[in-house]
Image (cartoon, rainbow, N blue to C red):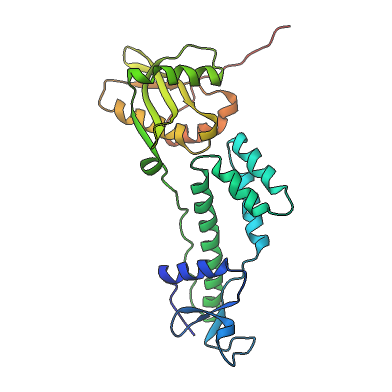
Amino acid sequence: MYFELTPALIEDILFCMENQNARFVLDTENSFVMNKDDIAGMDDSGGDRYVSIPEWHSSDGFHLMECFAAGFRNPLTRDALQASLERGRGVFRAFKAALTKFPGVEKHWFAFKRRKMRRTIIAWYNALREQWNMEKIGGEPDETEDLFPEDFIFRAYEAKDAEAVNALHNTCGKPHDVGDPVLVVETASHDFVGFIAVKRQETALSICNLEVCPEYRGLGIGSELCSRLIQTLEQEHVSKVYIELPVEFEGFSRFLYRSSFKPVATRYRLEMQ
């Protein structure tokens, strides 16, 4: 009955799990997924040779959509996805339509869904290994989908970008002037996405603008802009880099900690009547 859970077999199981119109089993002798109805004389237990693949119902898919929508950092995207899930009939179609409105988010969804379903398969396989008195296999590390090389273009700021930079800055409602833009990011079709700007003083540098269009937030673009800026500074005589983080972007602090930034001050404000 023993079989090896190969990458190819995982792909076959993933494909069949989402087919709600048939029941599938795994032929453990040949490591092949089959329609249960095509096996003549097989009893409900499947015997020793055949095992049922992990169950996956529409309710499981809906739960994944709920988890994905709730965990999305961009409130604009999160609200749109959650609103699509409030529909009764056609909720899966509505969710898919909502995804297409936010560039890059659909790719995140498929990566999230695939990762969760693969974990379900590994848990199923480990349960079988436990029956065989075998040691469980380890879970897969979290997959991180790298959007940037494929979906976005990061490049040095050019004079032609000034209008788009100022327009985004005004949209974001920032109170200060734009610093010296260093890097910009755009889609493969050259739609402007965001930029990072700095102010220099001797050997210190302050990141004074790190702005991304609202529909592209939550994809890690700001973190990537910051990382790429730091890489360019390795060739310069910069001893310190500062960034002031608004309280509403406190989650970004996790990236800063991972990048060896350390907090040096806390700013408080009192609104006078």
Q: Position of residue 209 (x, y in %)?
A: 46, 20
Q: Residue at x 51, y 76 (%)?
A: 129
Residue 184 falls in image quadrant: top left
Q: Residue at x 59, y 90 (%)?
A: 42
Q: Position of residue 163 (x, y in %)?
A: 42, 17
**Outermost residue toward the top in this view:** 273
Question: In the rendered view, would you say 22 is above or below 49?
Answer: above
Question: In the rendered view, would you say 96 is above or below 128?
Answer: above
Q: Residue at x 62, y 67 (%)?
A: 56
Q: Position of residue 189 (x, y in %)?
A: 40, 36
In the image, 160: left or right of 14? Answer: left
Q: Position of residue 61 (x, y in %)?
A: 63, 58
In the image, 92: left or right of 203? Answer: right
In the image, 220: left or right of 248? Answer: left
Residue 249 falls in image quadrant: top right
Q: Residue at x 39, y 40 (%)?
A: 148
Question: In the rendered view, would you say 251 is above or below 107?
Answer: above
Please identify the quadrant where the C terminus is shown.
top right
**Residue toward you, 156 or 161:** 161
**Residue toward you, 127 or 217:** 217
Is residue 65 something one can see in this rendering?
A: yes
**Outermost residue toward the bottom in this view:** 41
Is residue 266 something one can see in this rendering?
A: no
Image label count: 0
Residue 242 falls in image quadrant: top left
Question: In the rendered view, would you say 262 is above or below 60?
Answer: above
In the image, 246: left or right of 154? Answer: right
**Residue toward you, 251 or 25:** 25
